[in-house]
Image: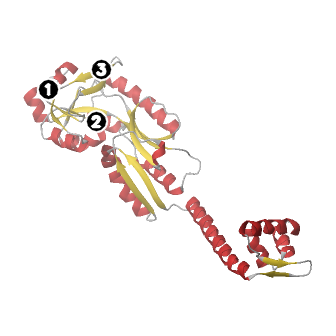
Amino acid sequence: MFLFSQVVQHKGFSGAARALGTVPSRLSRRIAELEARLGVRLVQRSTRYFAVTAVGEEFNKHCLNMMAGATAALEEAARARETPSGLVRISCPPMLAQSVLGPLLPLFMQKNPDVHIAIETTNRKVSIEENFDLSIRARQLPCEDAGVVVRSLGIVQKVLVANKAFLDRHGRPTTPEEAAGLPSISCLSPQGPHVWSVVSPEGSELQIRHEPVLIVDDFLLIRQAAARGCGLAQLPLSMCLGDIQQGNLEIVLCDFLAPLCEIQAVFPSRHGMLPAVRLIIDFLSAHCAGDVERSQIKQHIGQGRRGNARFWTACQSAEQLVTGAL
């Protein structure tokens, strides 16, 4: 159809062949094949005569429309490749959507008004076939993945916290066994088991089984309940740092910190990534520092505690991992 429109435009096979860099016989053969497939005569030609039939004139109008549509499609693809715009679909757990994406996306969208974002909040594992442009998740270190590309957005350190008045009433635990006996708040399913993972000063991972008085599938509600004295909870440091600074929460069991987690941006491939997706990933990477902030830890966890050395070693390893990922 493209070749036919070129023959019509150049008023013959010789002119079209010169414009396309081919030979007239090849064009004549292709148009003859088109006519045979359609069962109609599109052009009248001889060695001295060339004319487009009435059917050919109408057919050419559709060919031109087809070419215009194809050109528009190619230009649209080129714009998408060069300019950040369009819809980006993101999958993210509710907790990360609230604590990570929520504060940052308004700033991103103010700077990039042509980029539209659709977020599905879910705790399930999203497969690559579900047509998400980007998935945000938190994974315990170390972790390995095949078939996807991972960009680190920061390292998360969870801590056990409780309200100061709550600890004054119930006592401050010095061992995991004592912590297990306190009223607690859990983020797992009602069926349990309810477990906090921590790492001992010697480097071994322990499981603290506890019986919660409150089960909430939302870290923000857990933080609010813990700050009001409902029980002991394990939360990301960044989420409860404000309450710690204000004296509403206090870190307990400083020697038994949770294993480090990494916030990750996951996407199928770097090849063919739209500018809008790359722009969001770069923006989140630049603005997500995670919880590994030395000034915060030094201020809120005693530097002389024996668990601190283990924590700093883990932080340094995590920082090297993040540097390599970036």
Identified by mark 2, the residue type is: Gln
Q: Earlier in the sequence, mark 1 or mark 2?
A: 1
- Real-space CA distance between mark 3 and mark 2, rounded to the nearest whole angstrom: 26 Å
Mark 1 or 2: in front is 1
Residue 297 as seen in the image, left or right of residue 32: left
**In this rendering, is residue 71 above or below 306?**
below
Q: How far apart are the two marked residues, 3 and 1, measured between alpha carbons? A: 17 Å
Disc 1 target residue: 182
Depth check, front residue: 107 or 319:
107
Position above or below: 43 against 187: below
Q: Are marks 1 and 2 in contact (CB under 8 Å)?
A: no
Label 1, label 2: how far apart the Cα atoms are: 26 Å
In the picture, measured across the screen, residue 150 lies left or right of residue 51, that is: left
Q: List the residue tagged with mark 3.
A: 206
Tell me the residue at 38%/28% (across/down): 312
Tell me the quarter of the picture where residue 185 sits: top left
State the residue in front, 25 or 33: 33
- For marks 3 and 1, the one nearer the N-term is 1
